[in-house]
Amino acid sequence: MKSAVVVFPASNCDRDAAVALEQMTGTKPHIVWHADSEVPDVDLIVLPGGFAYGDYLRCGAMASQSRVMRDVKAKAEKGVAVLGICNGFQVLTESHMLPGALIRNAGLKFVCRRVAMTVEETQNAFTRKYNHGQRVTMPVAHGEGNYFADEETLDRLEGEGRVVFRYVDGDNPNGAARNIAGILNEKRNVLGLMPHPERVCDPLLGGTDGRALFESLIEALT
Amino acid sequence: MITLQIVREHGLNDQEYARIKGLLDREPNLVELGVFSVMWSEHCSYKSTRAHLKTLPTKGPRVLQGPGENAGVVDIGDGDVVVFKMESHNHPSFIEPYQGAATGVGGIMRDVFTMGARPIAMVNSLRFGEPAHPKTRPLVDGVVRGIGGYGNCMGVPTVGGEVNFDRSYNGNILVNAMCVGLARADKIFLSAARGAGNPVVYVGSKTGRDGIHGATMASAEFNEDSEDKRPTVQVGDPFTEKLLLEACLELMATDAIVAIQDMGAAGLTSSSSEMADKGGAGIVIDLDKVPQRELNMTAYDMMLSESQERMLMVLKPGREAEAERIFKKWELDFAVIGTTTDTHRLTVADMPVGSLSDAAPMYKRPFIKRAPATGMPSFDASRPVMESLLKSLAAPDMCSKRWVWEQYDQSVMADTVQMPGGDAAVVRVHGTDKALAMTTDVTPRYCRADPYEGAKQAVAEAWRNLTAVGALPLAVTDCLNYGNPEKPEIMGEIVAGIEGIGEACRALDFPIVSGNCSLYNETQGEGIMPTPTIGGVGLLKSVNRMATIAFKREGDAIVLIGETKGHLGQSIYLREIEGREEGSAPPVDLTVEKKNGDFVRGLIESGRVDTVHDVSDGGVLIAVAEMAMAGNLGAVVAPGTIPFLFGEDQARYVLAAPDGERLVSDAKRAGLAATLLGSVGGDRIAVEGAGEVKIDGLRKAHEGWLPAYMSGEL
């Protein structure tokens, strides 16, 4: 599996994503600068966590207008897998590659802690190595992760099996509608999620629940 | 025309002004006066403390750079070095908590990456006023959001620290931020601007009128008008700092840089004059070339602005284009604003550079060392132990600080192997098996009772916390927070504190490599408790041989290393349960401290023990309860008196391991005091003959106070 990590000026989980990808796939991903007009020919594009252009405006709003995102969009339409983690998820909703929006956490504070989720869908390239309904724990670290969409969109996401990760009841860190932590696009090749799977691929860091996500991608895209 | 009124407004006294005229051989103009005023401020010149700071141990076989540069540098083997420093941002944080704390974080990070290091962790030590004070809640909220807002955007994990409350901080909170970075030994960058004819380059944000006289403000007491000083607090922009970090590290990978210094307190003035002075060079600056954010800025504004996220560099001649390309890529301002000369003068205003730093006044201020508090306080022996345990765990100083650290990204960079809540945070050295442990410590109530023993204790506790995770303590950075040094009693606290720190650092092979002093922490004559914060860094050879505080196995024996006399003086128990703050501070026997610590570290390194907690605030029973909560496993503890269970004797550790009796006998053979304390198991803490309490109950007490307080329920 060939992969690329997009780097915006204030991305700060780009190295973490690259390290996890290299550990899991054995190959270093391409690092793509935000001002580049083209992403190399890869199977997976990762939009990492961070603050893109500072995010003083709505998170991901400026990044959605960046040069590199035009090509990310085009590649996604052709079927290339795109994984947006945290800030990457915000960029995906701002780019309308995923529906809905990520608004300020209900508690009005940045929150960094481990959260328990269930894997709700395994019929896709990102989660096929998890068991359906499996409980996993990953860290979140964000101030704007409160997933919001109108009822109709939410019903549609549920009906089409596009809610992939859901916070366990009582462990929703940000007030997200219907405990949604991660969703797919209609074609099921774009996943956005707030928690950080790349931070739980090493047992020393307190867990390995993120590994199956990368293993799924390797199996699906190799 | 400089009048005495203008001199006073610049925080200079008559003698100092006379000295300036002598050095220049004429009257200064306004720009020059402004430059002297900041450079000779207490904050920049250490004029009250320099003579005493010189007595501190700053050398060691691993120390590559001690105090005097932007940060200290310590060898950690394999060509790697750790670069670290702690700095206070107390005065600005009280006036404008969000921006004050945020720019404190930004400033200390710049100090570290200026040296060529990538910041890998932040730790911070925070002191607030009493919870009932109307300002405390908004200050806690603002400071914590500010630290998070800046550090989270930078993508550097905030991994630990301390938060305490006391009425002595009602008018002067303390925000001490420590940054730890990693570099290669052969890629360290210093600030000495050597050579003549080298381009002097300004990079980063544009200069505005913010923060003018911040350093002078930080060198005076507060009064009722202090809120008017809000314009002297700078505004932080972490996005620009992130760009600056990446651009600097990219340029540092080349060999284009001769010297580099961040523009912190006193901005362009201190960076240019310090660089020139250290390199024995001069600098000519053309202020028209300084990138400016506002119109009609004067030379005075530009020299004294403390706008954030700026750096001054001296490049090798001919390397400007290469450097400019990198800074343009990161969309940062880049301007050649001057050249180095061989005149040893700073020419904006024409003055000898040495006059600004070396010739700064150094005072031998009079001091009075007051007698330490003495005596063993009485206590009511009939009080129920378990109730006291719950009450102590819920006290503001003792309760869980989860509400704080959950607002900080603790795990970005994917190398944090011990998160907040343990004895020390542990961060892996990226791509290796090694790890760095870090902690900040001081117990101000001990320092108030006994400025000398209290300062010793702060060093000993930092050393112990590093040891308790299995790390070899390497070196120290410090923030010496005190009141007004012009008062002999306060100066006495400072002198005794520095003596105590020096003695402990010498005895524990724990040299000081960086730090700062924050004096004048007084409002309307009320000073803070002496608070010499100690930041310690230690090295773990292998992250696989590390201890944590969490109980791990049913049936493990619990062993107490170190002697317990039952010291209740100045203890948490006495304050929270008996409602009194009296008696002597617990004495620290540094020989015993070292012996006990080396023994415990040996057990961890050999793989015999993986569960260790140092005994500090609250004593043995609190330590056991914290271990139980962390591991979600209970314990049965042998009967003990109140002084035994809650006393705060030093140099002690609680261990849990399968072979308890052998551990005790090995410790005794090594000449240490050791006792079997009990065993791990069940879902509750039970003290034989004194009752029991479930872990859930402990947790409720421990976790409850801070969120309830911050939401306004208390």
Image (tube, coloured by chain):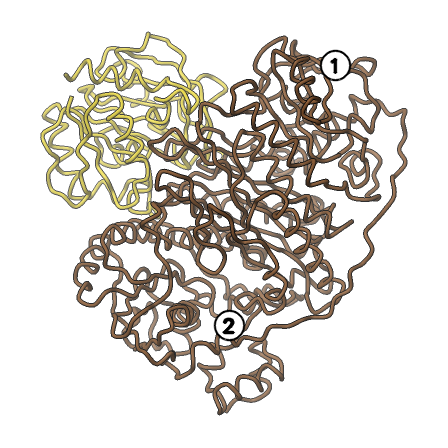
| Residue B627 position (above or below residue A123) | below
Q: Label 1 marks which chain's residue?
A: B
- Left or right, residue B66 beside residue B242: right
State which tag comes first along the sequence, 2 or 1: 2
Crowding at mark 1 (Cα within 10 Å: few <14, some 14-19, many 20+):
many
Relative to residue B44, is residue A41 depicted above or below? Answer: above
Q: Position of residue A204 (x, y in %)?
A: 42, 23
Mark-to-mark CA distance, 2 and 1: 59 Å
The image shows residue A76 at horizontal and vertical percentages of 14, 28
Residue B217 spot, x, y in % from top left: 56, 67
Residue type, label 2: Val
Q: Quadrant of the C terminus of chain B?
A: top right
Task: Say which of B38 and B212 sits in front.
Answer: B38
Q: Which secondary structure, mark 1?
A: strand
Residue B105 vs B672, above or below: the answer is: below
Please report the residue visible at 15 percent of the width from the left and 33 percent of the height from the top: A73
- Observer-nearest residue: B567 or B692? B567
Q: Nearer the viewer, residue B417 or B366?
A: B366
In screen coordinates, is B356 left or right of B338?
A: right
Q: Which residue is mark 1?
A: B686
Q: Residue at x 23, y 56 (%)?
A: B255
Q: Is residue B403 above or below residue A206?
A: below
Q: Color used for chain B?
A: brown
Is disc 2 placed on a helix, strand or loop?
helix
Residue B295 image-quadrant placement: bottom left
Q: Amino acid at mark 1?
A: Ala
| Residue pointed to by mark 2 | B38
Chain letter for the residue marked with disc 2 in the picture:
B
**At x 20% / y 20%, what residue is drawn?**
A186
Chain A pictured colour: yellow
